[in-house]
Image (cartoon, grey):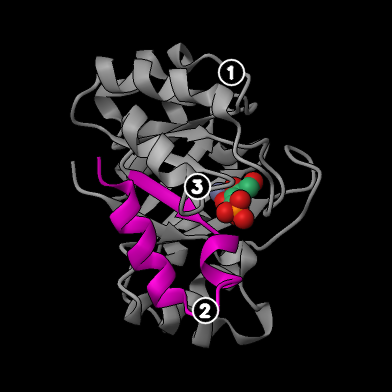
Amino acid sequence: MDIKISPSILASDYANLQAELEKCEKGGADLIHLDVMDGHFVPNISIGAPVITAMKKVCSVEFDVHLMISDPYFYIDDFIHAGADIITFHTECDSDIQKTIDKIIAGGCKAGLAVKPDTPVEEVFPYLDKLSMVLVMTVEPGFGGQSFLESTLPKIKKLREKCPLIDIQVDGGINTKTVSLAGSAGANVFVAGSAVFKSDNPAEAIQTLRNNARV
Ligand code: DX5
Ligand code: ZN
């Protein structure tokens, strides 16, 4: 499987988004991870579609949009028009999962489905044929800078055994050590916020994550 590194903008300097995006692009990021939080599905509010629209104009890396919102179905068109390439939403949301996946794909985007740490990974199984990616959250969604939960590793293994070819993304607490744990379990797409943006050298951080992810 291709290793992909997806820096999470949540940990970046929001006053200098264009410069932060350039660091990722020059540093060889495969994707840009955009965390959308509504203050309802998670107890935090981040950015929405207008900010993503603006960012898309100054960045040519694929946009990996992670919706931590209660009703993703209602907002899918906004994120498609904003320039999302992959839209991932949660099994724990209030929308109809199949209809939401179908709407994402009909709009020309790739669809991803996410599970929180305590949600069994089997919840995504009925939808696998339409999904490009499954996101196994390795922290409780809502905030950057949390510690990686090793209890999520068996879910990654189980999913990789069932789906040898699907992109398995991990998000939360990914650093130079935990990236190897998740990679050995079968993940191949790694979101990293603090590990990239709190580093003095984001390009080097991306490269180290990529090297350490290889199993
Ligand atoms: C958490 C977000 C993550 C977050 C990761 O709810 O989904 O994408 O930005 O941040 P780090 O890498 O700092 O744990
Ligand atoms: Zn995320």
Q: Which residue is mark 2?
A: 54
Judged from the image, the secondary structure of the residue bearing numbered disc 1 is loop
Q: Earlier in the sequence, mark 3 or mark 1?
A: 3
| Picture quadrant where residue 99 is located | top left
> x and y percent of residue 56 in the render?
43, 75
2 relative to 95, above or below: below
181 relative to 99, above or below: below
Residue 102 falls within the magenta-colored stretch: no
Q: CA distance from mark 2 to mark 3?
A: 17 Å
Q: Earlier in the sequence, mark 1 or mark 2?
A: 2
> x and y percent of residue 119 in the render?
59, 18
Residue at (63, 66) in percent of width and height = 11
Q: Which residue is mark 1?
A: 119
Q: Which residue is mark 3?
A: 76
**Nearer the observer, 175 or 119:** 175
Judged from the image, the secondary structure of the residue bearing numbered disc 3 is helix
Residue type, numbered disc 2? Ala
Residue 207 falls within the magenta-colored stretch: yes
Give the tally of numbered discs.
Answer: 3
Horizontal side of 179 relative to 19 (left or right) equals: left
Residue type, numbered disc 3? Ile
Residue at (66, 42) in percent of width and height = 147
Please report the bounds of the magenta region as a residue range: 189-215
Q: Quadrant of the N terminus?
A: top left
Residue type, numbered disc 1? Thr
Which of label 2 and label 3 is nearer to you?
2
Q: Quadrant of the C terminus?
A: top left
> x and y percent of residue 75 in the render?
57, 48
Judged from the image, the secondary structure of the residue bearing numbered disc 2 is helix
Q: CA distance from mark 1 to mark 2?
A: 34 Å
> x and y percent of residue 179 in the render?
43, 45
User: In the rendered image, is residue 112 in sight?
Assistant: no
